[in-house]
Image (cartoon, rainbow, N blue to C red):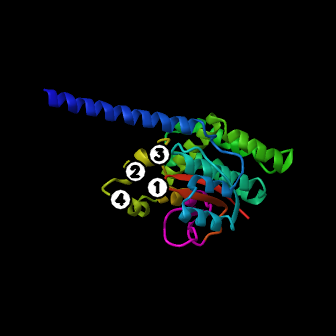
Amino acid sequence: MESMGRDGDHGNRDDLILQQQREIEREISDSTPLVSEQLPLTCLTAEYNGDAVFTAKIQALASKYRYMRRTRPDGNCFFRAFAYSYLECLITNTAAYDKFRQIAESSKDKLIQLGFPSFTLEDFHGTFMDVINRVSPNNIGGIEKNQSELHTIFNEQGYSDYVIVYLRLITSGKLQEDAEFYQHFIEGDMSIEEFRHQEVEPMFKESDHIHIIALCAALGVGVRVEYLDRAEGVNVKAHDFPEGTQPMVFLIYRPGHYDILYPN
């Protein structure tokens, strides 16, 4: 009985430690803006102070990118970084904006055709279109006003999260539409349907290559991801999605997290 008591104490202690760790992570997350102001890329050096490998790679990356924006590390960082970066790009590109707006407008009907319930889509699609309209290049006030509006929108939790939910649904729809192709990207015995419902549609689920590939395909957008890791060499490895396309969105990936990059 005494031994069982000690085992129980160890279990309770482990649970307490895990709970404290989650509370610390939540506090860090909640104290971080959903999307930060522009920061010099060299601000990353402070995070890896004394680490020669990462310091050298950050210096190399700084020759290609001057600024970055941090996103909150809440599991939604890829979708939030993608949406912010892409809409910011469209503010100065009327032709690309008009094309994207048409895709976004028709996306609800396409998802309904794929079997998504219209009552689920209605509010999210409405907010998604509202955000797109609020940063139109044709709005009065010009680029600076649109950029300020975009930053305000994405730091309002309601709007910001609704955009992410809808992008997750678009991604899920693309996986369903081309299930045979995307099945090859899924490890283990999980079906496309299970993957969509467990790893794509729920908020706070981290994104992998399959999410990026599907979203890029659904919207017709090129994304370049710079991978900051301990791989050999000084240069940071870049990966374009889809391969061979001209990227409009530039992101930096560190294990488990995406932020926004600004090319020189």
Mark 1 and mark 2: span between their CA atoms? 9 Å
Amino acid residing under circle 1:
Leu
The residue that label 4 is drawn on is 187
Labels 4 and 3: the sequence-earlier one: 4
Q: What element carries label 4?
A: loop
CA separation, marks 1 and 3?
16 Å
On whether residue 226 falls in the magenta region, the answer is yes
Are circles 3 and 2 on residues that touch, CB within 8 Å? no
Along the line of sight, the residue nearer the viewer: 30 or 186: 30
Find the distance from the CA under tag 4 to the CA under tag 2.
Answer: 10 Å
Residue at x 64%, y 53% (from the top left corner): 103
Secondary structure at numbered mark 3: loop
Taking depth in this image into account, of 10 and 96 the one nearest to the observer is 10
Residue drawn 62% across the image and 41% down it? 34
Residue tagged 2:
195
For disc 4, the neighbor class at 10 Å (few under 14, some 14 to 19, many from 20) is: few
Looking at the rendered image, the disc whose residue lies closer to the viewer, 4 or 2, is 4
Q: Quadrant of the N terminus?
A: top left
Q: Which of 115 and 18 is in front in this view?
A: 18
Neighbour class for label 1 at 10 Å: few (<14), some, many (≥20)?
many
Q: Residue 175 carries which label?
A: 1
In primary-sequence order, the first of circles 1 and 2 is 1
Does dot 2 land on a helix, a strand or a loop?
helix
Q: In which quarter of the image is residue 97?
A: bottom right
What amino acid does circle 2 point to? Answer: Phe
Query: Left or right of 120: which side holds 155?
Result: right
Residue 258 drawn above or below residue 60: above
Mark 4 or mark 2, which has the lower sequence index?
A: 4
